[in-house]
Image (cartoon, helix red, strand yellow):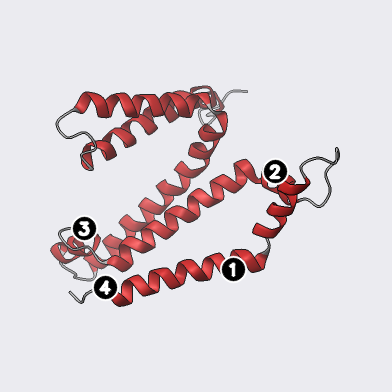
C-alpha cells in the first residue's frame, strides 16, 4: 500500500538531482575562484560537462548520493553549534570572523576539510570497497594480476596507512608551526 512517507519513487529521479547538484556546486565554485574571469559561459559549460559525467558514471552518482546526506547532517550540526554560541552571548560578528571573513580561523577551516574528506572517504569505500578488497585479497582466481595484488597488499597494510597518516599530520604541523604569527 502506498503511503505519504513512501519516497521510493524519488530514486528514479536521483540522476537528475545529482546532475543539478553537481552542476550548481561546480558552477558556483568556478565563479568564486574566477577560473575564467569574466566568462560565465565557459564556467557553465565546464560545470554542465562534469554534471553529465557524474550521470554517465554510476559510481560517481552513488558517491554523491551517499555523501550528500552526511553533508546535510554536518551543516545542520554547524548551524546548531553557531546557534549555541549565539545563545551564550557571543557576538555574531566574532562568529563570522571565525568561520570566514578576511582571516578565518585555520583550525576551523582544517577541521571542516578533514571532516569533509572523511565523509568522501566513507562514500568511496562504500562504492569502491569491493575493488579495493579484490586488490588486497591474497589469491587471484585466474593467476593473473599478482603484481597489482602485491602492491595493494603493501599499500593497504595498517603500518603503511599509519605512516601516510603520520606524514600528513607532520606536514600539517610543520606548516602551522612555521607559519608567521598573525
Q: Which residue in the protein does label 1 denote?
A: 162
> Measured from the top left, where is residue 130 in percent x and y?
70, 43
Q: Secondary structure at mark 1?
A: helix
Pick the front one: 76 or 166: 166
How many neighbours does mark 1 have within 10 angstroms: few (below 14), some (14-19), or many (20 or more)? few
Q: Secondary structure at mark 4?
A: loop
Q: Which residue in the protein does label 4 denote?
A: 179
* Of the image marks 3 and 1, the number of the one nearer the N terminus: 3
How many neighbours does mark 2 have within 10 angstroms: few (below 14), some (14-19), or many (20 or more)? few
Q: Secondary structure at mark 3?
A: loop
Mark number, residue 100: 3
Query: Mark 4, mark 2: which one is toward the viewer?
Result: 4
Mark number, residue 4: none
Q: Which residue in the protein does label 2 denote?
A: 130
* Of the image marks 1 and 2, the number of the one nearer the N terminus: 2
Height in image: 129 above or below 78?
above
* Of the image marks 4 and 1, the number of the one nearer the N terminus: 1
Query: Mark 2, mark 3: which one is toward the viewer?
Result: 2
Amino acid at each position: 500500500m502506498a503511503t505519504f512517507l513512501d519516497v521510493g519513487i524519488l530514486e528514479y529521479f536521483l540522476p537528475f538531482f545529482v546532475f543539478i547538484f553537481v552542476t550548481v556546486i561546480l558552477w558556483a565554485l568556478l565563479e568564486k575562484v574566477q577560473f575564467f574571469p569574466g566568462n560565465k559561459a565557459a564556467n557553465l559549460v565546464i560545470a554542465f560537462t562534469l554534471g553529465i559525467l557524474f550521470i554517465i558514471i554510476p559510481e560517481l552518482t552513488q558517491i554523491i548520493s551517499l555523501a550528500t546526506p552526511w553533508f546535510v547532517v554536518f551543516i545542520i550540526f554547524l548551524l546548531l553549534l553557531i546557534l549555541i554560541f549565539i545563545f551564550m552571548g557571543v557576538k555574531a560578528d566574532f562568529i563570522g570572523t571565525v568561520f570566514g571573513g578576511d582571516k578565518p580561523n585555520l583550525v576551523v577551516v582544517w577541521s571542516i576539510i578533514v571532516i569533509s574528506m572523511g565523509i568522501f572517504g566513507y562514500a568511496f569505500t562504500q562504492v569502491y570497497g569491493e575493488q579495493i578488497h579484490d586488490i588486497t585479497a591474497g589469491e587471484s582466481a585466474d593467476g593473473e594480476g599478482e603484481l597489482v595484488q602485491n602492491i595493494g597488499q603493501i599499500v593497504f597494510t595498517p603500518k603503511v596507512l599509519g605512516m601516510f597518516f603520520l606524514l600528513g599530520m607532520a606536514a600539517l604541523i610543520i606548516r602551522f608551526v612555521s607559519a608567521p604569527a598573525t
